[in-house]
Image (spheres, rainbow, N blue to C red):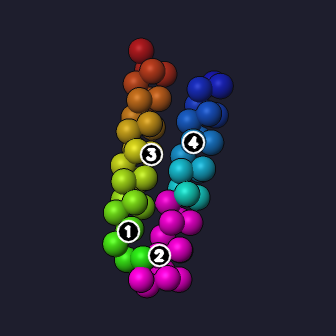
Amino acid sequence: MLVLIVALLVVVVGLLLVGGLGYVVYRRPTLTQPVGIAIAAAGVLVAVVVGLVQVTTS
């Protein structure tokens, strides 16, 4: 149960980070190249969630 709550918190915080990065890029169009940072952050978030799911099911 605790692992699932932690996984939920990781997802929420990760989504906030990705959204914040996207907002910064939207407000400052000169930062369009760092969009890759938001994509990389989303990839890391997915990897962490998959790892947590694997730990909870084994």
Marks 1 and 4, how far apart in space?
21 Å
The residue positioned 37% from the left and 77% from the top of the image is 32
- Could you tell me if the residues under marks 3 and 4 are in contact, i.e. CB atoms within 8 Å? yes
For the C terminus, the quadrant is: top left
**Residue ID for mark 3:** 45
In magenta, the rendered stretch is: 18-30
Marks 2 and 4, how far apart in space?
23 Å
User: Mark on residue 10?
Assistant: 4
User: Mark on residue 25?
Assistant: 2
The residue positioned 56% from the left and 36% from the top of the image is 7
* Three-letter residue code for mark 3: Leu
Residue 21 in the magenta stretch? The answer is: yes
> Residue 57 appears at what percent x and percent y?
43, 20
Give the mark, 3 or 4, whose residue is nearer the N terminus: 4
User: Mark on residue 35?
Assistant: 1
Q: Nearer the viewer, residue 22 or 52?
A: 22
- Could you tell me if the residues under marks 2 and 1 are in contact, i.e. CB atoms within 8 Å? yes
Badge 1 density bin: few <14, some 14–19, many ≥20, Cα 10 Å: some
Q: Nearer the viewer, residue 35 or 30?
A: 30
Marks 2 and 1, how far apart in space?
7 Å
Marks 3 and 4, how far apart in space?
8 Å
